[in-house]
Amino acid sequence: APGEVAGHLHPCGKVAMRGRAVRRRCFVTDGTRLVMPAFGAYAGGLNVRDAAFEPLFSKDFTAHLLGDGRVFSIGRGMLSKD
């Protein structure tokens, strides 16, 4: 639904560059819907490129990965599958 905010999927994003990969909790949105990350120590993360996210977002979405001291906004095309 437009304007929907959800949190159950516990999204994370993975970026691979120069032979290394980083996987971080993230907010993910297509501008209409937002899924928030889990912040608990024992909550896992489901990669935003997983099939479970396909029905929720249009082809394009942005993942806002939580880094150390800043947030990195990464488009779908730059994110890696697990």
Image (spheres, grey):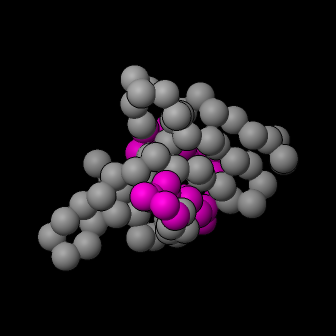
Residue 76, how many percent across, how many down? Answer: 50, 65
**Predominant SS along the magenta part:** loop
**Relative to 56, 20 lies left or right:** left
Instruction: Please tell me in which quadrant of the rendered image residue 7 appears.
Output: top right
Residue 38, how many percent across, how many down? Answer: 53, 34
Residue 53 among those drawn in magenta:
yes
- Pick the residue in front: 70 or 78: 70
Residue 60, how many percent across, how many down? Answer: 60, 65
The residue that appears at 30% across and 58% down in the rendered structure is 22
Residue 72 among those drawn in magenta:
no
Residue 29, how many percent across, how many down? Answer: 66, 55
- Pick the residue in front: 15 or 54: 15
Residue 49 in view: no
Residue 2 in view: yes
Instruction: Please tell me in which quadrant of the rendered image residue 32 appears.
Output: bottom right
> In the rendered view, would you say 21 is above or below 55?
below
- Pick the residue in front: 46 or 70: 70
Q: Which residues are magenta?
A: 46-70
Residue at the bottom extreme? Answer: 18
Residue at the front extreme? Answer: 69
The residue that appears at 59% across and 52% down in the rendered structure is 28
The residue that appears at 29% across and 48% down in the rendered structure is 82
